[in-house]
Image: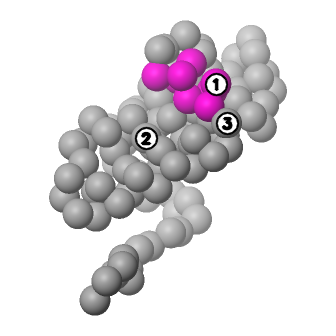
């Protein structure tokens, strides 16, 4: 067969099941995004819609084929989250005390 194969994926709304270590990571990554000083965050925030979409889809494709390193996958997820957060103003709702969404 030529072309992409159908890939089964799962997209779920937040269901509250995170380990304490994962919750800590979420808070740390949100802080990184909120600070807006990290090179990767700054780069992602300067991308346009097509560039961020291409980054996410290319990374998903590479991951599906076993060609993406963990750092690439995490970078794309962080970049996408940073782009959304800064575009939507999420991290600036309470600049004196930015907090991640409820975990």
Residue 88 in the image, given as x and y percentages of width and height: 77, 37
Judging by the rendered image, the residue that carries numbered circle 2 is: 76
For mark 2, give the secondary structure.
Answer: helix
For label 1, the residue is: 46
Horizontal relation, residue 20 to residue 78: left or right: left
Query: In x, y percent, where is residue 46?
Result: 64, 24
Residue at the (37%, 50%) spot, across then down: 59
Element marked by disc 3: loop
Query: In the image, which residues are magenta?
Result: 40-47
Q: Residues within 10 Å of mark 3 (few under 14, many from 20)?
A: few
Q: Is residue 25 above or below residue 37?
A: below
Give the percent coordinates (x, y) of residue 58: 41, 52
Circles 2 and 1: CB distance less than 8 Å?
no
Using the rendered view, name the quadrant where residue 100 is placed.
top right
Q: Dot 1, how many residues are within 10 Å of its Cα: few (below 14), some (14-19), or many (20+)?
A: few
Q: Quadrant of residue 66?
A: bottom left
Residue 95 sits inside the magenta stretch = no
Left or right of 95 on screen, residue 57:
left
Q: Which mark is residue 94?
A: none
Q: Secondary structure at mark 1?
A: loop
Judge whether residue 28 can be spotted in this image.
Answer: yes
- Is 6 left or right of 32, judged from the image as shown? left
Residue 4 position within the rendered picture, expressed as x and y whole percent measured from the top left? 36, 77
Quarter occupied by residue 35: top right
Q: Is residue 57 left or right of residue 34?
A: left
Front tag of 3 and 2: 3
Nearest the viewer among 48 and 88 is 48
Rendered-image quadrant of the N terminus = bottom left
- Residue identified by numbered label 3: 48
Contact between labelled residues 3 and 1, with CB atoms less than 8 Å apart = no
């Amino acid at each position: 067969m030529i072309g992409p194969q159908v890939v089964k994926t799962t997209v779920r709304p937040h269901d509250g099941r995170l380990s304490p270590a994962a919750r800590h990571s979420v808070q740390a990554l949100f802080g990184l995004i909120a600070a807006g000083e990290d090179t990767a965050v700054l780069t992602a925030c300067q991308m346009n819609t097509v560039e961020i979409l291409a980054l996410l889809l290319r990374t998903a494709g590479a991951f599906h084929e076993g060609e993406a390193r963990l750092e690439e996958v995490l970078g794309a997820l962080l970049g996408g989250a940073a782009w959304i957060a800064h575009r939507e103003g999420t991290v600036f709702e309470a600049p004196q005390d930015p907090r991640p969404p409820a975990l």
